[in-house]
Amino acid sequence: MTEAAQDYRVFLGMPGYGRQTEAAGRALWFSCEDLNKPIVNYQKGSLLAMNFNILWCKALNMRRQGIPIKYFAMLHDDLGPEDLWLDKLIAELEANDLDMLGVASPIKDENGLTSIALDMPGETWRPLCRLTMDEIYRLPETFTEKDTGHPILLNTGCWVCRFDQEWNDKVYFTINDRIIFDKQKDCYQPQVESEDWFFSRLCHEQGVRIGCTRKINMAHRGEMDFPNNVGWGRWKHDQSFVTQSVIPTPEQFNCDPAVRKPPALVHSEA
């Protein structure tokens, strides 16, 4: 490794609640070939967004003190990416000239959904849809909104971003909640804007170039391992939000986008 490659540090934060899996623990310490490069910090607490903000502030304060932190990365304590995943993720971020890059990871159920969503600008309380593993395997290995046609809302499970940018001082994590009355169902219902999608929307406002990749093999640990190295799941699209997939099939990629039938939204009347 050249001297120039070692003149920066990576802040690697893991938020958790004391239930770190074996695979996540290994990934925390085997993230980079140069073991001195990552500044590893485990933050334990039950307030999710506060945990994230504490890690973000620690990195900001270190940078303010003159520590050359070039990248910030986060890994949840139930995710097990492959060895040297952070080196590979940074290389992919640089190769695609992005500011932030997340790893696609499935939700822990049998539907094959992920928490990677497509945004509807101006709509706070729901995304257009979440991407399924099947849809992610129809997209390039590393994709952006140029490939999806919509801004990407990343999950915070496994990601990295540039940390020598002005926008780093202008973003934060929070969870927004409210209760609405659903006229169609004739009942009150809760709504939430999760901390990861809120953060992604803030980043979009700052012009941050966001991408998502499946080049890093990873498993999400629940009652079993839910992998990201193959398209799988009962759902081919997010049935909670749309009536059909927003990602073209291989046959549709060569079609005129103007003739593709847009999916109808699945929604309730508030």
Image (cartoon, rainbow, N blue to C red):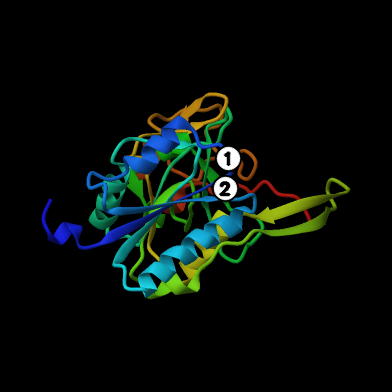
Q: CA distance from mark 2 to mark 1?
A: 6 Å
Do callouts 2 and 1 mark residues in contact (Cβ within 8 Å)? yes
What amino acid is found at the position of numbered circle 1 in the picture?
Asp
Residue underneath mark 1? 238
* Total marks placed: 2
Q: Position of residue 90 (x, y in %)?
A: 29, 52
**Residue 98: which quarter of the image?**
bottom left
Give the SS element for disc 2.
strand
**Residue 249: which quarter of the image?**
top left
Closer to the camera in the image, 83 or 63: 63
The answer to whether any part of residue 120 appears in the image is: no
Closer to the camera in the image, 137 or 254: 137
Q: Position of residue 27 (x, y in %)?
A: 37, 39
Q: Position of residue 166 (x, y in %)?
A: 39, 75
The answer to whether any part of residue 205 appears in the image is: yes
Identify whether 60 is placed above or below 269: below
Closer to the camera in the image, 67 or 52: 67
Residue underneath mark 2? 129
Identify whether 157 is placed above or below 10: above
Q: Position of residue 87 (x, y in %)?
A: 27, 47
